[in-house]
Image: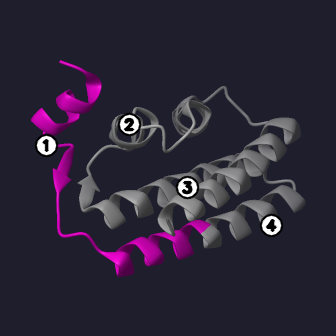
Amino acid sequence: MNDFEDCLRKGLLRRITPSKDKAESSMKKAERWLYEAERNLNSGSYDSCLIASYLAMFHAARAILFKDGWREKSHYCISRYLEEKYVKTGRLEREWVDLLDRLRELRHEDQYDVTYFATEEEAREALNVAFEFVERMEKILHT
């Protein structure tokens, strides 16, 4: 059993009615988080920038699931969905899933590890990746 099938079996990914409206709303949320991330970076709030950058990516990826008629109950399983339905079919480059996973792990470390503090460089890189990721998801959303 692969990770995607495991997500299905555990109910962490489930079918819903496809929704263009929810997809667009999720993409708007992604854009709002990008704005927040940029404001946080500019004010020196690097941890907040990192988290907001990841949330922009999360909502952009989630927009694809809504468009396709899926709902997640796990951040990890969003990546597994993109792998299964987009990377394996050649509609998305593997690097985007890897970047989503990387930022998800950094966000987790930032939230739960009391010794981790994001640097300006990490925050700036996260924001740049998030901008590119949201743009890439936007292209998929409108194809």
Marks 2 and 4: CB-CB under 8 Å? no
What number of labels is visible? 4
Task: Give the amino acid at mark 4.
Answer: Arg
Q: Amino acid at mark 3?
A: Leu
Q: CA distance from mark 4 to mark 3?
A: 14 Å
In the rendered structure, which disc, 4 or 3, sits on the residue that comes first in sequence? 4
The secondary element bearing badge 2 is classed as helix
List the residue tagged with mark 4: 39
**First along the sequence among labels 4 and 1:** 1
Location of residue 87 with respect to 18 vertically, above or below: above
Q: Which mark is residue 76?
A: 2
Alpha-carbon neighbours of circle 1 within 10 Å: few (<14), some, or many (≥20)?
some
Spatial CA distance of label 2 from label 4 is 27 Å
Q: Which residues are magenta?
A: 1-30
Foreground: 115 or 21? 21
Q: Main secondary structure of the magenta part?
A: helix
Say which amino acid is labelled 2.
Tyr
Residue at mark 2 to residue at mark 3: CA–CA distance: 13 Å
Q: Where does the image place residue 137, in percent across and percent down from the top left?
A: 56, 57
Report whether residue 81 is seen: yes
Q: Residues within 10 Å of mark 2 (few under 14, many from 20)?
A: some
